[in-house]
Amino acid sequence: MSLIERAAELLGHVSEARQKPSTDSERAGDQPRDPIERAVDNLRGGDFFGNTATRLGGGSSRTFTVDRERLRQQSMITPDGERTAVAENFRRVKRQILANASGSRAGAPPANLLLVTSALPGEGKTYCAINLAISIALEVDRTVLLVDADVAKPSVPGALGLKADRGLMDALLDSQMDLAEVLWKTDIGRLTLMPVGSAHKHATELLASDAMHGLLHEMAERYRDRIIIFDSPPLLAASEAGVLASQVGQIVMVVEAEKTSASALKDAIGRIEASKVAGLLLNKGDPLGFEYGYGGYG
């Protein structure tokens, strides 16, 4: 029995029916201006974190050009590159993610909040998070916010060729910070990046705070066309991963072929709500890319 098949037995049926949002404002198409795009476009905004009084002010826009050569060297998707096996595989991966994101189960966190994680370090979660974000950003009617939430070992900005010293943790610590200061709009489709920012000894508590909850609620509930992807620490290596997993609607588990043990995978899945697992992404399985399974995990 393969690792994926064993994982399927642990998870059972993870795909549950999700209800499509149907608020009056959504039906009428009368949604307020996107606060993240306002910040990035250097426009004035309102209260973003609710009670924390953080505001989107008139801070200068931050944009950067993603290093295409760096992407190619890491065998990642390039938006202007040739059709590759990796790009095709992530096109298949994102279809189910986008289908799930169209609605959420009653009482569950929004399904457009997606966590990419793994059981152990070194399984390729950051590689998969970046490729998935780029692939979704090339959709015609989707925007993507890629959040580097690996506090101990942030690596998303470096993989894209960006040097950034402030990010998510700084925004959570400073309720008066203009969110534009920690957002970077890229030249790839509709992709925006939020680095993790400064290391903090109470990172787990900050991620579990009301400020974080307010941030996630504002981004996810009011702007359903956005997919927010978190590159999380490994579940068995850092407590922050469990806190993040409790606040998202979908989780992708990256599994390294021929390395991740069934016991490690079982332990990791036991620390999260299994019904949130959208699928297992088998990384480094063959030179053609990835295998991805939903429900039956074939």
Image: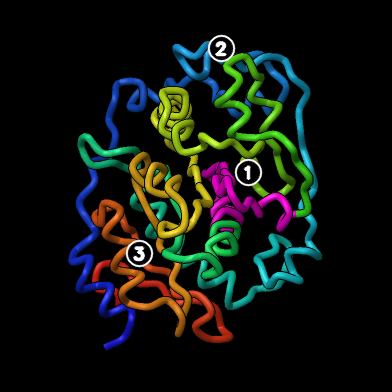
| Circle 2 residue | 46
Residue furthest out toward the front: 201
Against 100, is 205 above or below?
Answer: above
Report the quarter where the N terminus lies: bottom left
Badge 2 element: loop
Report the quarter where the C terminus lies: bottom left
Q: Position of residue 189 (x, y in %)?
A: 66, 48
Instruction: Indicate the colouring scheme.
Output: rainbow
Question: Marks 1/2: CA distance?
Answer: 22 Å
Mark 3: amino acid: Gly
Q: Position of residue 56 (x, y in %)?
A: 62, 17
Q: Which residue is at 59% across, 64% downward?
A: 127
Question: Marks 2/3: CA distance?
Answer: 37 Å
Disc number placed over residue 190 in the picture, else none: 1
Quadrant hosting residue 108 = top left
Q: Which residues are magenta?
A: 132-160
Disc 1 versus disc 3: nearer the observer = 3
Quadrant hosting residue 213 = top left
Q: Is residue 194 visible?
A: no
Q: Position of residue 265 (x, y in %)?
A: 34, 69
Mark 2: amino acid: Gly
Q: Position of residue 49 (x, y in %)?
A: 49, 19
| Viewer-nearest residue: 205 or 34 | 205
| Viewer-nearest residue: 12 or 136 | 12
Q: Which residue is at 58% across, 59% downward?
A: 126
| Viewer-nearest residue: 155 or 47 | 155
Tell me whether the residue at label 1 lies in contact with that at label 3, contact meaning CB atoms closer than 8 angstroms: no
- Residue 133 magenta-drawn? yes
Q: Which residue is at 70% across, 63% downward?
A: 78
Disc number placed over residue 279 in the picture, else none: 3
Against 69, is 28 above or below?
Answer: above
Mark 1: amino acid: Arg
